[in-house]
Amino acid sequence: MSEVMNLYKKRVERVYKAINLEQPDRVPISSALGTWSSYYAGYTDSESNWDLDKCSKSLLKVVNDIPMDVLHMFYARPGGMYQALGSKSFHYLNESNIVQYSDENAEVMTSEEYPEFIKDPFRFMVEKVLPRKYAELAKDTPAKDLALAKGAMQFGMYGAKKGAAEANLISQYGIPMLFDGLAIMPLDWIADFFRGIKGAFMDMRRRPEELLEAAQALTPLVIRFGMGQMFSTPPKANPKIILLPLHLPPMLKTADFDKFYWPMFKTIVEAFVANGVIPMPFYEGDWSRYYDHLQELPVKKTLGWFEHGDPKELKQKLGNTMCILGLFPVTLLQYGTKEECITKAKELLDDLAPGGGYIFSTDKELLSAADGKAENIIAVNKFVMEYGIY
Amino acid sequence: MVDLKVLTQAMSDLDEDVLNKAIDEVLSKDNNAAEVQEVVKACQQGMTLVGERYDSGEYFIGDLVFAGEVLQSVMDKLKPVLSAGFSAKGGKIVLATVFGDLHDIGKNIFRSMVEAANFEVIDLGINVPVSQIVDKVKEVNPDIVGLSGVLTLALDSMKEMVDGLNNAGLRNSVKVIIGGVPVNENVCKSIGADAFSTNAAEGVKICQRWVG
């Protein structure tokens, strides 16, 4: 076996041992360098969405310069596909900024449309949501069919670029990618893509039963879309990992979380696990109110990526349930000195590493150019590789 | 006369039905300007209670967003009959989501709560360039500049904003408060702001201390 393939094998083993709550040879490092990578390689987020090769090149530069065990994903969005469909969903404030969400533009469904949505969410998405989000799909046949064909072709090309980039990372540097896809939870999907966040909070008070039924109706689709992504990527020796970015829970009262979010979230996580897939929820914001809930998730079958929390409490409450990642503040990589960064990394390792079941990671994805000083990232990762030896 | 205590409680409980009924009742009367003023005050007091319930961990962001909407729709109904003499006396704030960021939910929560605390708010919206904020500060001479952002890139814009106030010789005439997910004490110091908060109710209290 070549040296690179040997490195690859060791890195994968390190990560999966941690997922299985075992102790690998050392603490694995997962790099959440997202669109920051483009800026690091001299491009912009926007450029690498239009020209996917720039994303591939940026990934290669990042793994060449920065020590790590695993990289999150091929982060570029298929700009060509969005263009072919006439997307109105993504916003660049200027050429050098990152893509952003607009709550105003997220609202493409009225509150009166819930009954229709609940009756058949897939039909509603195809017939109502898509034409409102994508101008080309609102046109008559054959214009919309042509747009769909062009979009599908662009998406196929995107898949090919993504696959080639992953293969290059493995064959040239022995670095695996962590995710094979992602899934959005029903309430987040309704809020972020159909009703707007504000709209969803209004619905929670003004039409709670309809909102609940809509979230329930969407649940099987979330599983289907997630599994579709798992089936459409080449087979892997180990279970595939699906990212679940979670959005609204820290903004909800616990009673609302119990009603509108947790049952669907648990169902979806369990369904992925039953299908041999490892979910990796990104617990954005403060989830400490929900740790008892999270203890009910399937043991050794999920990765928990945390933005906030007390590391000792996390380890104590969830260390026997899931592999823990996160907590290292991106703002420290941006504003801190090398010494401050290393001190923080040491604190986290002291609390989270003992016994295994831990992967070092930042508290969120790095997105814009200033999100982290490269010298800080390199210093921290080097430190973790030495200090994290078991 | 509607029961102002019930009104304050309904605002605090986010009970729209009770609020709307009471407000429609007041609006249906003649010569109601004085009563409308009292109603506005009662709702603002209710909003302060909402802030307290957020502080105590009973309410969360979703409730604040809803509360802001409810108060806004109440004010929209009452404004036409508010007498001209009714003006904010708490202080003046120029507020913006900084350049490069278009997230405004946090900013809007803060706006509705600080307005309820009787501040006059000049809200410049989202993605606001430094020059526009500086010009507005020159024009209206506020007590406070409030800068909001969600993305970490907003922090750089906040710093540029503080530098912009310095360069225009305005820094010492205003207090600067920054708010949003990525702010913390370290960031506040590097940026050169006077205060930071990730909690709108706490932000309002800081502003009240400054003008109080």
Image (cartoon, rainbow, N blue to C red):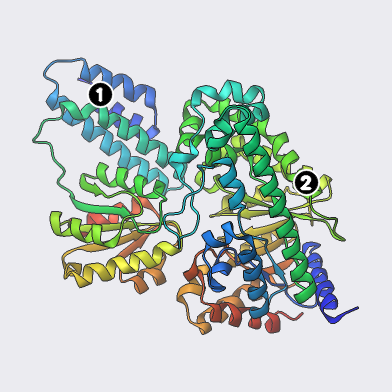
Residue closer to the observer: B90 or B158: B158
Tell me residue A212's x, y (percent): 60, 30
Position of A389 relative to A96 (above/below): below
What residue does disc 1 label? B3
Task: Judge left or right: residue B118 versus residue A134.
Answer: left
**Left or right: A343 as drawn, with respect to B137:** right
Chain letter of disc 2 in the image: A
Q: Position of residue A123 (x, y in %)?
A: 66, 26
Residue mark closest to the camera, 2 vs 1: 2
Q: Visible in this render: residue A329?
A: no
* Residue at (17, 67) in percent of width and height: B170
Q: Amino acid at mark 2?
A: Phe
> Which mark identifies residue A372?
none
The answer to which of B23 and A227 lies nearer the viewer is: A227
Q: Residues within 10 Å of mark 1 (few under 14, many from 20)?
A: few
Which residue: 47% across, 70% down?
A370
Q: Amino acid at mark 1?
A: Asp
In the picture of the structure, the residue carrying the numbered disc 2 is: A272
For residue A139, what is the image quadrant?
top right
Instruction: Judge left or right: residue A81 versus residue B79.
Output: right
Please state, as top left, top right, bottom left or bottom right, where the C terminus of chain A lies in the image: bottom right
| Residue under the point 23% across and 63% down | B175
The answer to whether residue A260 is visible is yes
What distance separates the C-alpha of mark 2 from that of mark 1? Answer: 54 Å
Question: Regarding mark 2 in the picture, which secondary structure is present there?
Answer: helix
Q: Secondary structure at mark 1?
A: loop
Which residue is most to the right?
A: A1
- Cβ–Cβ below 8 Å for labels 2 and 1? no
**Residue at point 26% right, 63% down?**
B176
